């Protein structure tokens, strides 16, 4: 009988932890669907990418898993009595992160050199994305980029381009573009160009800027998957 009682207690504790994790997870998914690029899940993923693991291309999904772990951890510190209470605790973990994660999108264009002193401001906004500004004396090289949708149609009006330093994951600049052809002007180095738009597959391309100007075409496939869901997993990689 004691064995049965112990098993019931273990199952009850496991149910409480799972309920808390699901509470945080479900609220995170809802926030992602409603708030798009301003979702707390994406801000948490961006913080991890820029400060802990630059190669984290599928950070949205990782952030959702972390939310579930945080929810379960809260219940481990102070265990609720029912699964309903545990589910609410999971909600509260997400609400706390949402309050402490102000949305500060990069305001720079794509033709800015990365500022390596920007990390000094990270503690001022733990979950914010610091903008990078150009140094006036940094020589740049032009790179002409052409985005080529597989359908051959024009790019959607909400097409967004993000340029990162390849090795650090730091955002150099972002821009909404109205044409599939534009020019980057960056110092020599290796960069990652990310493109996202409704109706298209999120795509990334590694770009190496050397001492001479160059032209690069980036093919982009159509997709019926909502953009908010695509942000949970890695973009399609194009080798240049």
Image (tube, rainbow, N blue to C red):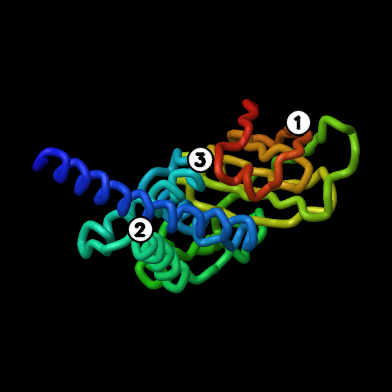
From what the image shows, is residue 221 above or below residue 144? above
Earlier-in-chain disc, 3 versus 1:
3
Q: Residues within 10 Å of mark 2 (few under 14, many from 20)?
A: some
Q: Secondary structure at mark 3?
A: loop
Q: Which dot marks residue 83?
A: 2
Q: Is residue 154 left or right of residue 104?
A: right
In this view, which residue lies farthest toward the left? 2
- The residue indicated by pointer 1 is 219
Q: Which dot marks residue 45?
A: none
Closer to viewer: mark 3 or mark 1: 3
Q: How far, Cα to Cα, is label 3 from label 1?
A: 21 Å
Q: Percent from the top left, x then y, of residue 183?
A: 74, 46
Q: Percent from the top left, x then y, of residue 135?
A: 54, 60
The image quadrant of residue 202 is top right
Closer to viewer: mark 2 or mark 1: 2
Q: Secondary structure at mark 1?
A: strand
Quadrant of the snapshot with the C terminus: top right
Residue at (12, 38) in percent of width and height: 3
Q: How far, Cα to Cα, is label 3 from label 2?
A: 30 Å
Q: How far, Cα to Cα, is label 2 from label 1?
A: 48 Å
Quadrant of the snapshot with the N terminus: top left
Earlier-in-chain disc, 2 versus 1:
2
- The residue indicated by pointer 3 is 58
In this view, which residue lies farthest toward the top? 239
Q: Percent from the top left, x then y, of residue 237?
A: 61, 30
């Amino acid at each position: 009988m004691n064995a049965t009682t112990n098993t019931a207690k273990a199952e009850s504790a496991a149910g409480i932890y799972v309920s808390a994790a699901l509470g945080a997870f479900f609220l995170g998914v809802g926030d992602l669907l409603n708030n798009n690029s301003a979702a707390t899940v994406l801000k948490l993923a961006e913080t991890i990418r820029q400060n802990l693991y630059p190669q984290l291309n599928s950070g949205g999904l990782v952030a959702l898993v972390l939310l579930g772990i945080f929810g379960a951890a809260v219940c481990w510190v102070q265990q609720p009595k029912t699964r309903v209470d545990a589910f609410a605790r999971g909600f509260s973990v997400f609400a706390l992160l949402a309050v402490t994660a102000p949305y500060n999108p990069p305001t720079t264009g794509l033709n800015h050199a990365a500022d390596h002193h920007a990390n000094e401001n990270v503690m001022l906004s733990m979950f914010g994305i610091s903008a990078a500004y150009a140094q006036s004396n940094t020589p740049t090289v032009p790179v002409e980029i052409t985005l080529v949708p597989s359908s051959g149609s024009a790019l959607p009006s909400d097409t967004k381009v993000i340029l990162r330093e390849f090795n650090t994951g730091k955002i150099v600049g972002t821009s909404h573009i109205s044409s599939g052809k534009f020019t980057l002007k960056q110092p020599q180095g290796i960069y990652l160009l990310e493109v996202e738009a409704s109706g298209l597959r999120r795509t990334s391309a590694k770009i190496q800027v050397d001492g001479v100007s160059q032209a690069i075409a980036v093919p982009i496939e159509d997709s019926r998957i909502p953009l908010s869901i695509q942000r949970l997993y890695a973009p399609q990689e194009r080798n240049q």
